[in-house]
């Protein structure tokens, strides 16, 4: 009786993106497998001042949050604008992808994406200056993310 | 080595590996699906020419793909009710070209209807019935046979000993198809239809309506009564009948094809007997029709159809269906809602906002997760920035005005929605418009609402932001700065007992003391409660708990993560301190004292304490109802904690039940395998395979061991399940008991002092009791016997008993 009508009921907000973690220990297939069963989300474009409490309040709207890990500048050990949110169930994480991704936190549009799972060390930015890579090269002025990009600051 | 097909290996995508050639059957089937699903969407050609074209394509494909086409059409009938008339027209055209196909389709639909009813898929069954009835308009089904089916449906009302919700559904199925097919059926069979009407009227008159107050969003009748859904539909259908079935809203593409369709031969529906009632049937719950707007609210433009007009019913049905189809993709959902056909004749934005809030406030629960509606409204605002935000503001204003009679559960949802919505729009709001709430008692619904909204807004931002966004006159409603209250700050006038100990403990922790070391340090804390004969000092010692926990929380106050780490690190100490029920209660008291200005922190820490089994769920319930919490008893965060606690308990039971079921399955599989092995071994030994004979005993012993282990595991799990279920039942009993005590106290006090029982506190408390029933009705159904015999007896005050009786009436 039940055929799914794939043509119609897409759930594209839940699909995995093109991003793959270059530091992932394993091959592409393994990473994608983990992404498809993951209960952990990467959250990006946070203000440096956004707190764990704010993240918890927002992401609790799609289910019980198991753990939040705030991303840190590798050198300064201060928040550098991203975090991981881990749920107890995949379904709750999917609802976050559907309804929290692309909405605002601390007046900024945040972006969520599937993460293969937190491992010690992944809480640090991978940019040369210690923060995230995207803050190394950007040209714009963003007061909530340290002002100008690092490259611009150095020049 | 398992045999794997090439297509399984290393394929990262979810699509099975397909080799694409242009006329591959799978390709054509996908194309058919796509063509059928997309007909009716925005196109350069007219709907009629698209339907005509598609009918031609499908007719040509019938010889090779009939089965697939049948399945797709049955699926769209079931899953795309908002495009009902588009697909009935398509089927009509196909039937005109191929009579046999029409017949097979009708048969397939009847089979599908039977299956959906058996599988408790009542909303899908409803769409199928509606589809069949519209097929009468397309000359696919003969009107008399449709009337006969309706007669069988209505005769369910004559069945004895059935739940009311069963007969309700069958009556609803008939009534809700009439906007589409009423005219045609009345033209052909008016005598029979009149008879049906009388039967329905008789049924509706004697229906029990005890459940209605529990499901209403507002208790007031004005400005819009919250009508029971069947009553409302009946009024709408009666009005339609009075208007001679003139209905101008439904899009009917088949009218354009009338000349073709009326040449077609019709089929008779086979006689359809509704499947008999069974105990595992789960009929839809009754609901109340949510109305917040009428024609006076839309300032200019098209007029909103009246509350008893059938147009209103059809519009609301279609909008609900669109949300049901597209809720996962908010952009698509918003676009589909805004491109509703016929939108130029109605104030569409008002209908959309009303339907969305209707779902959000639906009792017991919204059809979809709350946060979806927030996201959807934001998308709608993006797509209609010039009009929708104003309608939304108007709606918010209206709901604020009517807070006094709004159900507490709905107010909770409104608070969550409004604060989250504001956080996406820089918290811009004309707070001054609500200055009237400042002169009211702070416990009254309006100031309470504003206070709770500001608290939630603060959680999404920070304290100073809230101070900045509201006018200074609102300062009394601003939430407290969420800082901790450490009682052992040094250098006070009268040092507290335990101050010295607190310093010792603090230093110990800073010096990375272990759990054992901390316990040794704590042994020296005197026990203010201690009797002289309690020698060990291991009994409940409130001071020990205070000294340790206050100090620990103080050291870890920086963030949630710090506090979680602290609780994890000193789990052993905490377990030791909370060995007794009093200990568990006290730890919650201390936590509250320390973090009373930061309800969010209290919530997350209580959650952790439960998950790490330092306190149990009943302790949390007792704490919430304790006299110390009376001051915060009406605050939103307290109920969030209680319901979160109950949910954790429920999930825990489900989890262990699942483990038990899985273990049982495993055992069954083992036993089946064992039987297979026995047969194999016997056969092999008969064929003189000496090495098998040798290993036969070993293999048998291994499998016996495994089985034994599994059986032991199952026994353990069985015990665990029983113990968890007992804990769960106990939790609910505790909660109900405490409610009854509190409410009875209030009622008695009012009676003896001669004051009206309906205080703000009372309304809040009794609705919180209702909320327990509504939010967890599935679990509570199991306890009906106990509840009736132990707690909700006839001796109970009728105000409290009424809540219980309304709950019972929900699944009559």
Image (spheres, coloured by chain):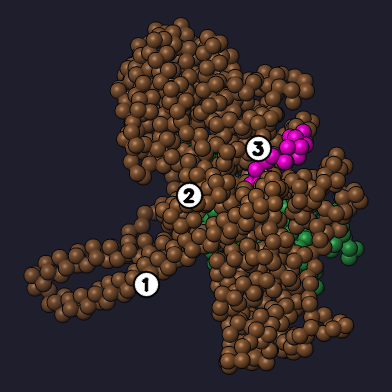
> Which of the two discs, 3 and 1, sits closer to the camera?
3
Which quarter of the picture shows residue B63? top left
Is residue B309 visible in the rendered image? The answer is: yes
Q: Callout 3: helix, strand or loop? A: loop
Which quarter of the picture shows residue B384? top right
Give the vertical position of B538 relative to A58 (above or below). Answer: below
Q: Is the magenta stretch mostly helix, strand or loop?
A: helix
Image quadrant containing the C terminus of chain B: top left
Q: Mark 2 lies on which chain?
A: B
Q: In this view, does B265 lie to the left or right of B240?
A: left
Judging by colour alone, the chain drawn in green in this rendered image is A
Q: Which chain carries label 1?
A: B
Counting from the top left corner in percent of width and height, residue A24 is at 60, 66
Give the Cα distance between marks 3 and 2: 28 Å
Is residue A40 visible in the rendered image? The answer is: no
Image quadrant containing the N terminus of chain B: bottom left
Give the vertical position of B480 relative to B141 (above or below). Answer: below
Give the vertical position of A17 relative to B35 (above or below). Answer: below
Name which residue lies at 33% across and 70% down: B715
- Color of chain B here? brown
Give the Cα distance between marks 1 and 2: 40 Å
Q: Tags 1 and 2 in contact by the CB under 8 Å rule?
A: no
Q: What residue is disc 2 on?
A: B794
* Magenta residues (range): B393-411
Q: Is residue B356 left or right of residue B396?
A: left
Give the crowd class for mark 2: few <14, some 14-19, many >=20 residues within 10 Å. few
């Amino acid at each position: 009786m039940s055929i799914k009508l794939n043509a119609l009921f897409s759930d594209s907000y839940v699909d995995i993106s093109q991003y793959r973690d270059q530091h992932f220990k394993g091959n592409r297939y393994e990473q994608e497998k983990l992404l498809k069963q993951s209960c952990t989300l990467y959250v990006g474009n946070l203000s440096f001042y956004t707190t764990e409490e704010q993240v918890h309040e927002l992401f609790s709207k799609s289910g019980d949050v198991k753990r939040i890990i705030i991303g840190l500048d590798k050198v300064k050990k201060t928040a550098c604008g991203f975090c991981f949110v881990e749920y107890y169930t995949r379904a709750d994480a999917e609802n976050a992808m559907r309804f929290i991704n692309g909405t605002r936190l601390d007046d900024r549009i945040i972006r969520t994406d599937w993460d293969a799972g937190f491992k010690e060390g992944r809480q640090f930015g991978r940019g040369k200056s210690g923060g995230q890579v995207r803050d190394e090269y950007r040209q714009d002025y963003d007061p909530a993310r340290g002002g100008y990009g690092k490259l611009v600051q150095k020049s | 080595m398992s045999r794997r097909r090439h297509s399984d290996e290393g394929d990262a995508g979810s699509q099975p590996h397909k080799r694409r050639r242009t006329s591959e059957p799978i390709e054509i089937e996908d194309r058919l699906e796509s063509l059928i699903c997309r007909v009716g969407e925005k196109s350069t050609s007219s709907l009629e020419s698209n339907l005509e074209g598609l009918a031609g394509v499908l007719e040509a494909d019938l010889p090779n793909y009939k089965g697939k086409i049948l399945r797709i059409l049955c699926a769209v009938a079931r899953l795309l009710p908002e495009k009902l008339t588009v697909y009935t027209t398509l089927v009509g055209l196909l039937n005109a070209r191929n009579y046999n196909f029409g017949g097979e389709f009708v048969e397939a639909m009847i089979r599908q209807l039977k299956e959906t009813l058996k599988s408790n898929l009542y909303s899908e069954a409803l769409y199928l019935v509606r589809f069949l009835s519209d097929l009468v308009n397309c000359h696919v089904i003969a009107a008399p046979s449709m009337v006969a089916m309706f007669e069988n449906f209505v005769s369910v009302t004559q069945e004895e000993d059935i739940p009311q919700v069963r007969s309700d559904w069958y009556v609803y199925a008939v009534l809700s198809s009439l906007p589409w097919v009423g005219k045609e059926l009345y033209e052909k069979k008016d005598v029979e239809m009149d008879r049906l009407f009388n039967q329905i009227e008789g049924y509706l008159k004697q229906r029990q309506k005890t459940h209605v107050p529990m499901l209403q969003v507002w208790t007031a009748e004005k400005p819009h009564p919250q009508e029971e859904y069947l009553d409302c539909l009946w009024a709408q259908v009666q009005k339609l009948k009075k208007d001679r079935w003139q209905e101008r809203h439904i899009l009917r593409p088949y009218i354009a094809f009338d000349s073709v369709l009326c040449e077609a031969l019709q089929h008779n529906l086979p006689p359809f007997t509704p499947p008999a009632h069974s105990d595992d049937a789960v009929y839809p719950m009754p609901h109340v029709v949510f109305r917040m707007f009428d024609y006076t609210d839309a300032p200019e433009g098209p007029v909103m159809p009246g509350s008893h007009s059938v147009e209103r019913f059809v519009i609301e049905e279609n909008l609900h269906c669109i949300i049901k189809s597209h809720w996962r993709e908010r952009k698509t959902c918003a676009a589909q809602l805004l491109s509703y056909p016929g939108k130029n004749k109605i104030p569409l934005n008002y209908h959309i906002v009303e339907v969305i809030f209707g779902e959000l406030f639906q009792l017991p629960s919204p059809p979809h997760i709350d946060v979806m509606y927030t996201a959807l409204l934001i998308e709608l605002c993006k797509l209609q920035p010039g009009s929708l935000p104003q309608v939304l503001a108007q709606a918010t204003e209206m709901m604020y005005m009517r807070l006094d009679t709004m159900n507490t559960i709905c107010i909770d949802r409104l608070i969550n929605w409004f604060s989250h919505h504001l956080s996406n729009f820089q918290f811009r709001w004309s707070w001054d418009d609500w200055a009237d709430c400042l002169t009211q008692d702070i416990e009254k619904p309006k100031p309470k609402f504003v206070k709770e909204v500001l608290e939630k807004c603060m959680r999404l931002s920070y304290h100073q932001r809230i101070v900045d966004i509201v006018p200074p006159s609102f300062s009394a409603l601003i939430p407290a700065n969420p800082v901790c209250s450490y009682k052992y700050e040094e250098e006070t006038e009268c040092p507290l007992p335990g101050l010295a100990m607190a310093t010792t403990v603090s230093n110990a922790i800073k010096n990375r003391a272990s759990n054992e070391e901390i316990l040794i340090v704590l042994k020296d804390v005197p026990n203010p409660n201690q009797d002289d004969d309690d020698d060990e000092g291991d009994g409940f010692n409130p001071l020990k708990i205070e000294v340790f926990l206050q100090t620990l929380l103080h050291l870890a106050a920086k963030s949630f993560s710090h506090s979680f780490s602290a609780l994890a690190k000193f789990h052993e100490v905490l377990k030791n301190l909370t060995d007794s029920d009093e200990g568990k209660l006290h730890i919650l008291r201390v936590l509250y004292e320390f973090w009373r200005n930061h309800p969010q922190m209290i919530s997350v820490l209580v959650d952790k304490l439960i998950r790490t089994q330092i306190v149990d769920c009943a302790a949390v319930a007792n704490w919430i109802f304790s006299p110390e919490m009376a001051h915060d008893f009406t605050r939103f965060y307290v109920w969030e904690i209680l319901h979160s606690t109950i949910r954790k308990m429920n999930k825990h039971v489900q989890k262990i039940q699942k483990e038990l079921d899985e273990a049982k399955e495993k055992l069954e599989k083992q036993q089946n395998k064992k039987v297979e092995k026995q047969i194999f071994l016997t056969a092999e030994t008969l064929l003189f395979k000496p090495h098998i004979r040798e290993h036969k005993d070993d293999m048998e012993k291994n499998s016996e061991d495994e089985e034994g282990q599994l059986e032991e595991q199952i026994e353990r799990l069985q015990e665990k399940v029983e113990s968890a279920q007992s804990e769960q039942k106990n939790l609910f009993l505790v909660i109900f008991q405490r409610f009854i005590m509190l409410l009875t106290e209030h009622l008695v006090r009012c009676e003896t002092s001669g004051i009206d029982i309906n205080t703000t506190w009372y309304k809040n408390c009794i609705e919180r009791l209702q909320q327990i029933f509504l939010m967890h009705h599935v679990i509570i159904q199991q306890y009906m016997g106990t509840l009736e015999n132990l707690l909700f007896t006839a001796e109970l005050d009728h105000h409290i008993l009424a809540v219980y009786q309304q709950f019972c009436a929900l699944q009559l």
